[in-house]
Amino acid sequence: MRELARRGETIVVLDDLSTGKRRNLDGVAGEIEFLEASIADPQALARAARGADFVVHLAARTSVPRSVEEPLETNAVNVEGTLRVLVAARDAGARRLVYAASSSAYGEARTLPKAESMPAAPISPYGAAKFAGELYARVFTRVYGLETVSLRYFNVFGPRQEPGSPYSGVLARFLLALVRGEDPVIFGDGEQSRDFTYIDNVVDATLAACTAPGLSGQVLNVAIGSRVSLNETLRLLARLTGRPVAPRYEPPRAGDILHSQADITLARQLLRYEPRVGFEEGMRRTWQWYLSEYSPAQS
Ligand code: UD1
């Protein structure tokens, strides 16, 4: 949002604030038309999409374990909701829709790194729903001529990510625990690894995907292209924060995959994408933000 505002674009945001906060738009709120509504509401969607050249569809019900507990709700938002956004973009005559797809589409595929040419094999309702969204996007390209690009984001993190729910992303949870002087929880032995991707890289790829030529119908990985285990992550955090880190180990979560790492060759070629902020630098910036936002002294 901030980058779009900086570029002087006209921006309409539709968000039901089910996980985000109005405050996250501080500093750019004056440059944005904000509609507090859900993607389940076709009228609100039509209003938001009217006159849009590009639709970036980021709304989703996140979390693998929540999808295991509530598959119908996950489907309603991530599949039906996505279908509604596609319909709204089509009806508004948008030039292109960029869809936030997910690395969870790969599931347990053992080969690393994961390339788009590998078959999708999701192992959670979340992964299945996110993959279904890709299929719908491609179908809309083929049947209705709406240009679509699906970006498989790999474990995105950064400032403003909500840390307060059991379903929040692991790095947000780790950082909140450290700010509060609590012990972070690791589900499993901590040797599982992820291609944690700092938000600025995701913004670069997403905006490039709006305008790069010849992309319609494509599916592209967006990541850093390396992986780090949860145990290594906590060691790094101990170093960055200077605080003691003593994780509590609990049983692994259902639907969890072991390792995730992207091949980003295609995004490099087609989007001229290059991750600008590495994992360690991203963690440093994110820690600073959590520190200023959640330190006991601040609240
Ligand atoms: C998955 C997707 C990701 C998507 C996200 C949305 C994969 C590889 N990634 O993330 O692209 O954006 O869903 O929700 O499928 N964990 C702990 N302690 C905690 C919280 C989590 O140890 O307090 C562990 C989890 O068990 C998991 C890892 O950390 O092994 C990452 O979990 P999480 O941040 O929830 O993301 P994924 O499920 O990997």
Image: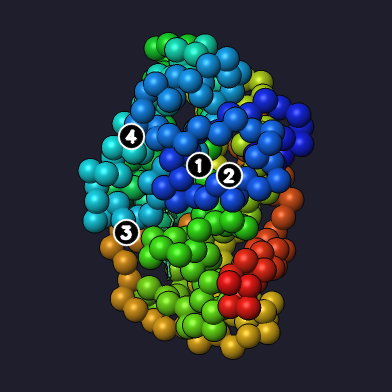
Disc 2 crowd rating (10 Å Cα; few below 14, some 14-19, many 20+) is many
Real-space Cα separation, disc 4 to disc 2, in angstroms:
21 Å
In terms of image quadrants, where is residue 252? bottom left
The quadrant where ligand 1 appears is bottom left
Note whether ligand 1 is within 8 Å of mark 1. Answer: yes
In the rendering, at what x and y percent does residue 126 appear?
34, 47
Q: Which residue is painted at 66% across and 48% down in the image?
A: 26
User: Residue under circle 3?
Assistant: 65
- Check disc 3 and give the amino acid type: Pro
Note whether ligand 1 is within 8 Å of mark 3. Answer: yes
* Residue 12 sits above or below residue 290 on the image: above
Q: Which residue is painted at 63% across and 29% down in the image?
A: 11
Disc 3 crowd rating (10 Å Cα; few below 14, some 14-19, many 20+) is some
Residue 148 is at least partly visible in this image: no
Mark 1–mark 2 contact, CB under 8 Å? Answer: yes
Query: Which of the marked residues, 1 or 2, is nearer the chain's N terminus?
Result: 1
Q: Which element carries disc 4, helix, strand or loop?
A: helix
Query: Which of the marked residues, 4 or 1, is nearer the chain's N terminus?
Result: 4
- Check disc 4 and give the amino acid type: Val
In terms of image quadrants, where is residue 255? bottom left
Q: Nearer the viewer, residue 102 or 72?
A: 72
User: Residue under circle 4?
Assistant: 79
Real-space Cα separation, disc 3 to disc 4, in angstroms:
17 Å
125 left or right of 198 in image = left
Query: Which of the marked residues, 3 or 4, is nearer the chain's N terminus?
Result: 3
User: Residue under circle 1?
Assistant: 152
In the rendering, at what x and y percent does residue 17 appear?
46, 45
In the rendering, at what x and y percent does residue 194 appear?
51, 61
Q: Which element carries disc 1, helix, strand or loop?
A: strand
Question: Any mark on residue 222, and which?
Answer: 2
Question: Any mark on residue 137, and which?
Answer: none
